[in-house]
């Protein structure tokens, strides 16, 4: 009786162990490694500030017109998931606005998004500027000419003070 009980326990314990063994039918395949490309480069353009944003800045003792210049740098990493498919983006955009008016209005954006194989791109993320903290949404297209990339981006930053609308361009070199 003891040997039957012991044998039964060994068989019951061995069944889960056998299920964990690696066989060709249940071998797990690791996902392919992602390829990352740095697409950092200068950005410049124009931002339109609604009257509410201009009033908010005036309350902060910043006198500015509705239209300001933008100059800055975009730090971008593009991650490829598979050949020919969309890629994911992570980017930081640091801009100095208002230089045309003798002002320095810094802004920082962190965007995450997607880029299609044809260069259409969409992103969303937080924006921090003297006008406050808000959520930025951007869309655009990147044109490619050899190793040169020419992004054209349209961004909207709605906030409780009003709307900021930007058009930015620049260039990057694909390395």
Image (spheres, grey):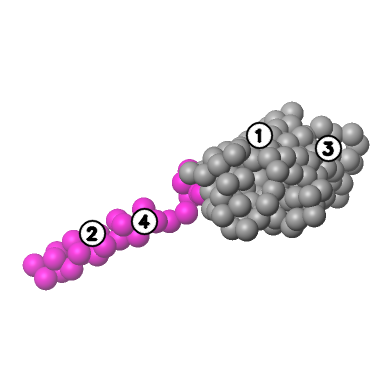
Q: Nearer the viewer, residue 76 or 32?
A: 76
* Few, some or many residues within 10 Å of mark 4 (<14, 14–19, 20+): few
Percent across and percent down for residue 91 are 67, 50
Q: Is residue 104 visible?
A: yes
Quadrant (top left/top right/bottom left/bottom right) for the N terminus? bottom left
* Few, some or many residues within 10 Å of mark 1 (<14, 14–19, 20+): some
Q: State the separation of the CA atoms marked 2 and 1.
A: 59 Å
Q: Which mark is residue 18?
A: 4
Percent across and percent down for residue 35 are 71, 49
98 sits to left or right of 172: left
Residue that badge 2 annotates: 12
Query: Number of numbered discs present?
Result: 4
Q: Earlier in the sequence, mark 2 or mark 1?
A: 2
Name the residue at the left extreme: 1
125 sits to left or right of 146: left
Percent across and percent down for residue 126 are 56, 50
Q: Nearer the viewer, residue 134 or 75?
A: 134
| SS state under label 2 | helix
Decide whether the magenta segment is chiefly helix, strand or loop.
helix
**Highlighted magenta segment, given as a residue range:** 1-29
Name the residue at the right extreme: 146
Q: Residue at x 75, y 40 (%)?
A: 46
| SS state under label 4 | helix
Q: State the separation of the CA atoms marked 4 and 2.
A: 10 Å
Residue that badge 3 annotates: 150
| SS state under label 3 | strand
């Amino acid at each position: 009786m003891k040997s039957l009980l012991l044998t039964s326990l060994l068989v019951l314990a061995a069944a889960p162990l056998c299920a964990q063994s690696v066989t060709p039918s249940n071998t797990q395949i690791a996902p392919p490694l992602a390829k990352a490309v740095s697409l950092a480069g200068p950005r410049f353009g124009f931002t339109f500030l609604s009257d509410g944003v201009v009033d908010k800045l005036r309350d902060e003792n910043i006198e500015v017109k509705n239209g300001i210049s933008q100059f800055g740098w975009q730090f971008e990493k593009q991650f490829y998931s598979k050949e020919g498919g969309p890629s994911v983006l992570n980017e930081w955009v640091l801009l100095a606005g208002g230089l045309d008016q003798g002002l320095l209005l810094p802004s920082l954006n962190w965007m995450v998004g997607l880029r299609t194989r044809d260069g259409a791109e969409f992103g969303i993320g937080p924006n921090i500027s003297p006008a406050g903290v808000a959520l930025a949404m951007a869309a655009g297209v990147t044109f490619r000419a050899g190793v040169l990339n020419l992004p054209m981006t349209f961004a909207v930053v709605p906030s409780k003070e009003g709307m900021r609308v930007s058009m930015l361009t620049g260039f990057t070199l694909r390395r």
